Image (tube, helix red, strand yellow):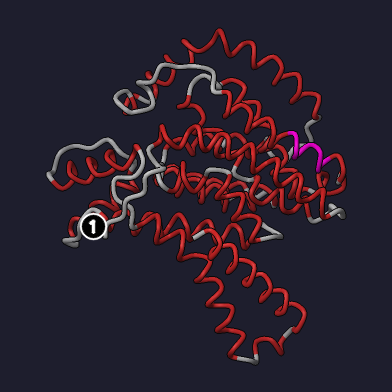
């Protein structure tokens, strides 16, 4: 699946490069249209089909099925409005629960492919980072509502870069209709495009880690107070312990980002890349505060997923092929350590399809 997706992503980008080089003559040939369409479809379909056709994979699958049953039975169900409307549409159309996944996965992967096309300078590498970064497993196969929400937030990045607050706000509000955690991204519009010294991030991070040991009870109380729907979930019931693999993944990704930024200061100063850089750094700071509590890691995803665009864009400026490979392998290795140790708890390693 991954090889097919990455292969078609590479072909897709090659088609676009030919298009840019050839100008109008590219579009005069219908074969080029067909090739471009096949490559885009080939990039989209593998992950979409694997995700949308799964059955009882991930901790959240049973929760989503319960939502569907409750709504179908006319019982009150506390779930975000857009996801609830999708369930109502499927039920009234006389379709079974799997159609809820077909629709939400279409939205999630549709937004993903649009964002990679919009922001990334290396489509194939972006898909590799999406897969090995754990987003396919932990979001696609488990937290599909938040995946759709994150897709809208990522699409809204362009409005932070271009300083169009109201359009960004619309994106956040739509995202919040799928997963209410998206609303925390509203105030970050005023922060992500600012020039913030690395020393400030460093000091806050160093303070955050030791404080983390003392504020676990406070953060747990806040979570139970403001997110009561998760009281009986598979997340809130866990015994908290320091998540070393998660911390390793965050630190290694941040270190590689800093290395690339140090080697490409002009790229970092670029206003568009500044949003990604600040996102990664803010995500790392938040991660320092929530290494003990898995529920808060949901918030980090909103900031860190920008790495799938930012790292490929920075690597474009790295001349040494071996250094590129080494840095990519460091990030992937750190991500894999976290993925392997977490995927089992998320129940996403044993795949079952509807067929």
| Residue 175 seen anywhere in this rendered image of the structure | no
Residue 133 position in % (x across, y down): 58, 44
Total numbered labels placed on residues in the image: 1
| Residue 56 seen anywhere in this rendered image of the structure | yes
Tell me if residue 260 is in the magenta stretch: yes
User: At 79% across and 56% down in the image, what residue appears?
Assistant: 316
Residue 178 position in % (x across, y down): 40, 45
Q: Which SS type dominates the magenta stretch?
A: helix
**Region in magenta:** 255-261
Foreground pick, 211 / 318? 318
Left or right placement of residue 76 versus residue 297 in this view: left
Quadrant holding the C terminus: bottom left
Q: Tell me if residue 246 comes above or below residue 167 in the rendering.
A: above
Disc 1 target residue: 90
Residue 187 position in % (x across, y down): 59, 34
User: At 17% across and 41% down in the image, what residue appears?
Assistant: 70
User: At 86% across and 53% down in the image, what residue appears?
Assistant: 320
Tell me if residue 330 is in the magenta stretch: no
Q: Tell me if residue 347 comes above or below residue 16 in the rendering.
A: above
Helix or strand or loop: what does disc 1 sit on? helix
């Amino acid at each position: 699946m991954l090889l097919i997706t990455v292969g078609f992503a590479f072909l897709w980008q090659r088609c676009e490069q030919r298009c840019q080089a050839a100008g109008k003559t590219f579009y005069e040939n219908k074969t080029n249209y067909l090739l471009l369409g096949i490559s885009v479809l080939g990039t989209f379909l593998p992950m979409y089909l694997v995700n949308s056709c799964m059955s009882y994979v991930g901790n959240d699958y049973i929760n989503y099925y319960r939502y569907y049953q409750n709504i179908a039975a006319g019982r009150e169900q506390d779930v975000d409005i857009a996801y609830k409307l999708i369930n109502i549409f499927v039920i009234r159309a006389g379709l079974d629960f799997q159609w809820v996944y077909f629709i939400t996965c279409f939205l999630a992967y549709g937004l993903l492919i649009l964002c990679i096309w919009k922001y990334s300078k290396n489509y194939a590498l972006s898909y590799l980072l999406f897969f090995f970064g754990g987003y396919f497993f932990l979001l696609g196969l488990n937290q599909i509502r938040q995946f759709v929400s994150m897709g809208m937030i990522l699409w809204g990045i362009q409005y932070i870069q271009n300083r169009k607050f109201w359009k960004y706000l619309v994106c956040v509000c739509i995202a919040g209709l799928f997963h209410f955690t998206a609303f925390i991204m509203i105030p970050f519009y005023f922060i992500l495009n600012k020039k913030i010294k690395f020393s400030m991030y460093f000091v806050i991070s160093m303070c955050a880690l030791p404080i983390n040991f003392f504020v676990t009870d406070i953060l747990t109380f806040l979570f139970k107070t403001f997110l009561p729907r998760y009281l009986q979930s598979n997340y809130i019931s866990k015994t908290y312990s320091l998540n070393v693999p998660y911390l390793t993944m965050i630190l290694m990704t941040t270190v590689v980002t800093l290395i690339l930024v140090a080697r490409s200061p002009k790229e970092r100063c670029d206003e568009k890349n500044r949003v990604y850089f600040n996102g990664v750094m803010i995500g790392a700071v938040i991660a320092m505060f929530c290494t003990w509590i898995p529920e808060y890691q949901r918030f980090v995803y909103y900031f860190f997923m920008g790495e799938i665009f930012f790292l490929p864009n920075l690597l474009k400026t790295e001349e040494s092929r071996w250094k590129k490979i080494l840095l990519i392998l460091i990030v992937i290795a750190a991500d894999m350590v976290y993925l392997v140790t977490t995927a089992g708890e998320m129940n996403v390693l044993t795949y079952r399809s509807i067929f």
